[in-house]
Amino acid sequence: MFNSIRGRIIVIIAMLLVSAYYLATNGIKLGLDLQGGMHLVLEVDDPEGTMTEDARADAIERSERIMRNRIDEFGVEEPIIQKVGCCRLIVELPGIGPDDESRAKNLIEQAAFLEFKLVLPVAEFESRLPQIDRQIVNVLGMDSLQALGGVAQGPSQELQNLLFDGLNVDSTQADSTGVDEDAEEQDQSPNLIPLQSLLLIGDMEGVFLVATENVERARLFLALPEVQRAFPRNVSLHWEADPIALDLRPYRRLYVTTEEAFVDGTMLEDATAQRDPNGNQAQVNFEFNRVGGRRFSRFTEQNIGNLIAIVLDGEIVSAPVVRARIGASGVIEMGNADMAEAADLALVLRAGALPTKLVIVEERTVGPSLGQDSIDRGQIAGIIGMFAVVLIMISYYRVVGVLAVMALAVYMTLVLGGLAAFNGVLTLPGIAGLILSVGMAVDANVLIFERIREELILGRATRTAVEEGFAHALSAIVDANMTTLFTALILFQFGTGPVRGFAVTLSIGIVASFFSALYVTRTFFLIYLSGKKASDPISI
């Protein structure tokens, strides 16, 4: 059937319809150089310079693989992710609009290190507050504390009573002033409690509250190395990611937790975003591997009634109460976050945590004007090239040249449809590959036509000359196309970014060229010869 004229026409029409379908549904995706996007340069966050060059290089190498997984799941087509030197990573994301820029940056910068920690009573930390306050005063001094917004000489008892209906500050906090009254009189210095004055009794066990306007000051105090050395053993503090409102005022929760996590994200097997069927809020369902599931199950069974903090990149996203033993799966409640945030969190959890935090040291946006200029120039080059090919083929080969031009139109449709079907990205080098493949398609037709001419000169009948021409040109066409196709596949395997775009376009073009020259052009020849006698000449 496929050797008859009708069968050949059906095959060609079917191929054109499939190509048109993919063009209509997927369209042609453009690369960074044609449609613009984001260009980011990332470095390892090492402000104190404690990491060696080998350690930074290793962190960048591992980050490259994780970043590629994240961006592939994010859905950006043909991103460029490559190392520069030993300590920098370049990320280029084509087609990222203003609405997606902040989301993409958060996705890239987020370390996504997940930990599960037990929330401890605040008494575990309160006993060290007097010592911590003394360290803050000693390190910063009175002048610096005054510049930060003043210092207090006693806990904010009235505000706590107002907020919590008479709940008093723990006696340790209320009475701890760092020095007794006699010492104060001797030193003739004020009784300063810079950190205690910012901490209010929390609305649940294991939690302090800090007014949002005081959060940065509290962070500064807690970040001091001398303060961290004064922490109790196996105790750490973590801020909750989102503020809460109490008595119409915003506060941030500060949790007291164990320093060591009993389970972390390295034991995660899967994470998916979905909506809570009861409250319709976004949430992330996670599942541990076998080891993590056993450890999580055993720990929750031993801590029923306690709070378990889910810590992501050092901040607590939720701290549910353990009501019963929890198995190998659980849920991270996202509160008022939308599904896009939940999907991004699930994505980075699946892709894995970065070995160290990365910071953006350079950010550029490739505007649409550059992309449009490249598209215009590429279109002009393509139009000029196609017009020149059409003119030369028709003027030199006459009617047979018209058949070649028709086959070339089919070829172009197949190439564009193939790009759309494989979600290929058209870049400026890709346009060069497309124009090169057009030249190869014409070259195959020239080989066939010249062989037909030679057969006619030898006195062959028209149909015989056409058959012999196609048969004798086949080996040369196969050799030329196969060697170029192998080169394109090597470029695709080992190249990056625009080089891969060039290789994809060239590969699809070679396959379409081979089909067009040996099947489409021959079909048009058969249609042309069907109205002629065996001895009638052809216009070639």
Image (cartoon, rainbow, N blue to C red):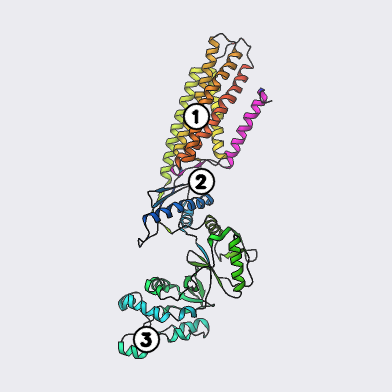
Q: Quadrant of residue 462?
A: top right
Image position, residue 464 (x, y; %): 60, 13
Report the residue at 36% width, 80% height from top: 134
Q: Residue at label 1?
A: 483
Report the residue at 58% width, 71% height from top: 320
Tell me the distance, in whole angstroms, between the alpha carbons under discs 3 and 1.
85 Å
Q: Quadrant of residue 538?
A: top right
Report the residue at 59% width, 22% height from top: 522
Image position, residue 245 (x, y; %): 51, 73
Q: Which mark is residue 77?
A: 2
Judge by depth and name the residue closer to the eye, 423 or 354: 354
Q: Amino acid at mark 2?
A: Glu
> Which span is picked out in magenta?
5-33
Which circle's residue, 3 or 1, is located before the other in the chain? 3
Q: Label 3: how many residues lie within 10 Å, few (<14), some (14-19) or many (20+)?
A: some
Image position, residue 521 (x, y; %): 57, 23
Image position of 435 with respect to 256: above or below: above
Task: Give the main secondary structure, helix, strand or loop, of the magenta stretch.
Answer: helix
Which circle's residue, 3 or 2, is located before the other in the chain? 2
Image position, residue 13 (x, y; %): 63, 30
> For the N terminus, which image quadrant?
top right
Q: Residue at label 3?
A: 179
